[in-house]
Image (cartoon, rainbow, N blue to C red):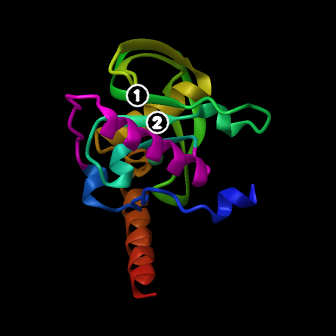
Amino acid sequence: MTEDIEKQAPLNIIIAPDPVLKTVAAPIDKVDDDLRKFLDDMLETMYIARGVGLAAPQVGISQRILVMDPARGEADQSPQPMVMINPEIIWRSEELNIFEEGCLSLPDYYVEVERPASVRVKYLDRDGKSQEMLAENFTATVLQHEFDHLNGVLLWDYVSKLKRDMAIKKFTKMKKEFDVL
Ligand SMILES: [Zn+2]
C-alpha cells in the first residue's frame, strides 16, 4: 500500500467551491484512444485518492464521464472498475435508501442523502458500445452521486441553505489558506 501513497495521481482533483463543479457537463460525441487514456487516468486518480467514484468535472473536465468502483468500499473485495460515458438514468425505484456520503471534492464533509435504492442506467462503455445496468444499494448511491456531478450538483445541495452557506464559507476560507501556503 505504501506504493499507492507515494504514487502521484495523474489528474488533479478540484476542491469545491469551483465553477466547473457547478456546470452541467457536455456529452461526449466520440470514444477514441485519447478518451480511453483519460478514463484510465480517472480510475488511477480515484484509486490513489481512495475514492469509490469520480466524475470528469471533478478533475476540471466538463464532460459526461464517470468512473466508479463501489466494491472498493469493502476491504475484502477485489477491484471492479466501471466507466460510464454519457450515462442516463432511465429508471428509479420508489424504494429509497439513506447513506452517509462523502466526496473527493469536499474533503471531510459528510451528508446523509436519501436516494432511490435502485436505478437502471444506460451508458456507453470504453469501446463506445451502448450498455445498460441495474445498480442497487450502495452501487446505486455511488452512481447517483457521480451522476449529480455531471449536472453540477454537489452534496451540499442536499442540506438547508443555511448549512450550505456555512459549508461554502468554510471551504472558501480553507482554499484561500491553502493558496497562501
Ligand atoms: Zn463527489
Which element carries disc 1, helix, strand or loop? strand
Residue 94: x and y in percent read 47, 14
Question: For residue 70: magenta?
Answer: no
Looking at numbered disc 2 in the image, what kind of residue is underneath it?
Val
Residue 140 visible, this angle = yes
Residue 140: x and y in percent read 52, 25
- Measured Cα–Cα span from mark 2 to mark 1: 6 Å
Residue 109: x and y in percent read 54, 57
Q: Are marks 2 and 1 in contact (CB under 8 Å)?
A: yes
- The CB of the residue at mark 1 lies under 8 Å from ligand 1: no
Range covered by the magenta-colored residues = 23-51
Q: Earlier in the sequence, mark 2 or mark 1?
A: 2
Residue at (27, 40) in percent of width and height: 63
Residue at (74, 31) in percent of width and height: 77
Q: Mark 1 points at which residue?
A: 84
Looking at numbered disc 1 in the image, what kind of residue is underneath it?
Met
**Residue 80 falls in which quadrant of the image?**
top right
Q: In this view, does 136 lie above or below 103?
A: above
User: 95 or 34, which lies in front?
Assistant: 34
**Count of numbered badges drawn on the protein:** 2
The quadrant in which the N terminus is found is bottom right
Mark 2 is surrounded, within 10 Å at the Cα level, by few (under 14), some (14 to 19) or many (20 or more) other residues, namely many
Q: Name the residue under label 2.
A: 67
Q: Is residue 165 above or below residue 151?
A: below
Q: Give the left or right position of residue 66, taking residue 45 as reference.
A: left
Which element carries disc 2, helix, strand or loop? strand
Q: Give the left or right position of residue 146, taking residue 64 as reference.
A: right
Q: Give the left or right position of residue 109, taking residue 166 as reference.
A: right
- The residue sitting at the right extreme is 76
